[in-house]
Image (spheres, rainbow, N blue to C red):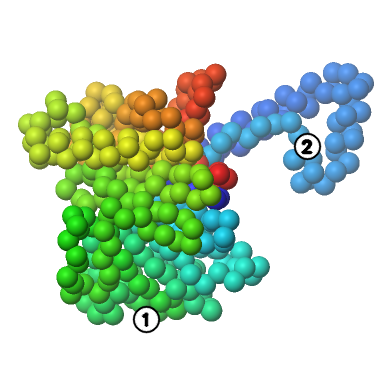
Amino acid sequence: MRVTFWGTRGSCPAIPAAWEVRGYAEGVSAATIAYVRERLQTETGLNELRELLQGTPEEIESELPISHPPIFGGETTCVEIETSEGNVIILDCGSGIRNCAAEILQRRRETKLSEISVFGTHAHLDHRNGLSFAGICFANPPFDIQVFGCSGFLKALDSRFAMFSHTVSESTYSDDPIDYTAMSASFSGVEIRALDGEEELGTGAPWQVQDIAAPIMIGSTAVRPFKSYHGSTECLGYRIEHGGKSFLFSTDHEKLSPESIGLPNLGSDEVTESLQAEQKLIEMCQGADLAYFDGQYFREEYYGHQGIGSSPAMSRVGWGHGCVEDILERVSQTGINHALIGHHDPERNWPAQMAMAEQLQKLSAGKDFQIELARDGQTVTL
Ligand SMILES: [Zn+2]
Ligand SMILES: [Zn+2]
């Protein structure tokens, strides 16, 4: 399977600031000038330079031995999985889904894709703010889009677009003028919840219900949902297995520590729930070839000893997000091969991310696992 990360920013899309773009361009120019100056020192270098300059600007660019620094991206959560059978599974509909959909429509010219499965994690806006900008909703011929998620996610989408109930309400147009009638796609919903062995008797909701304990099969791909801990907001993670490989997707999950008991809105029930979810996550992580985690904070920022960018130092305990240190611990416990840290804080600017990426590279050196920052547009083939 091919896993592409279309949106890895947390909470709010963040495009690079003008000074970040300038810094990037200046870095590349400085490296190019240094390269040219060095070539000019010798006859051989001069000849190499002459030969290089024969090419088109594109050829010169691709042959210049200048490495471009990585860009981590600014769209909110969206990950696409394309299986060897050609099935497409999209995880979350953050603003990254707009580019994801554009690429699917491009590819559709060569494939006969007509069905797409969308798995949502939870109702928060950053995980669904891209849907009404996604070309797959408006395509001709239309797509059948099956949406899986917890009831909060399905309810949030339905109250915005009325795509399952076909009942437009006051809340439908609260963000933009689009409802399901403007979309060509036909949508069906599947709610994932713990049925605890009970047969579902019907809830009157305009979607089917599926037990969280049973894997969902998309062709030969198994999608195994599990509960994450995201404060009072219901949230799911997924383990996707295809062709003997596995991808673990966990976002918006917080591991609370018992010391948090007594902080605003945090009692022993919350801590127990969080630690149970962490235990389940560790179980689901076992032997994963690739994993994506929410690492929005460093512990010092989480506990409020340090700010993030222009955001002051304040406690972020109970906000529902994870720490980088928790991910490192998890990876060492579970035999994950390749871990990606995402849900980047919008205040984590590019130089700070570059420094973080460097630290992670040092940490992974000589180890049998790799940990790196997730980047928008990054593809991993398993
Ligand atoms: Zn989020
Ligand atoms: Zn959230």
The answer to whether residue 199 is visible is yes
Taking the spot 46% from the left edge, 66% from the top edge, the residue there is 116
Does any atom of ligand 2 lie closer than 8 Å to the CB of label 1?
no
Tell me what residue is drawn at x 21 percent, y 55 percent: 194
Describe residue 246's horizontal placement relative to residue 301 as left or right: right
Q: CA distance from mark 1 to mark 2?
A: 50 Å
Residue 27 higher or lower than 117, as above or below? above
Give the tally of numbered discs. 2
Please rate how many residues cluster around mark 1, counting C-alpha atoms within 10 Å: few if below 14, some from 14 to 19, many from 20. Answer: few
- Which of the 4 quarters of the picture holds residue 22? top right
Which of the two discs, 1 and 2, sits closer to the camera? 1
Q: Position of residue 166 (x, y in %)?
A: 28, 80
Q: At 63% from the left edge and 35% from the top edge, which residue is drawn?
A: 68
Residue 292: % across, % down: 42, 41
SS assignment at label 2: helix
Q: Which mark is residue 181?
A: 1
Q: Amino acid at mark 2?
A: Glu
| Residue where numbered disc 2 is placed | 63
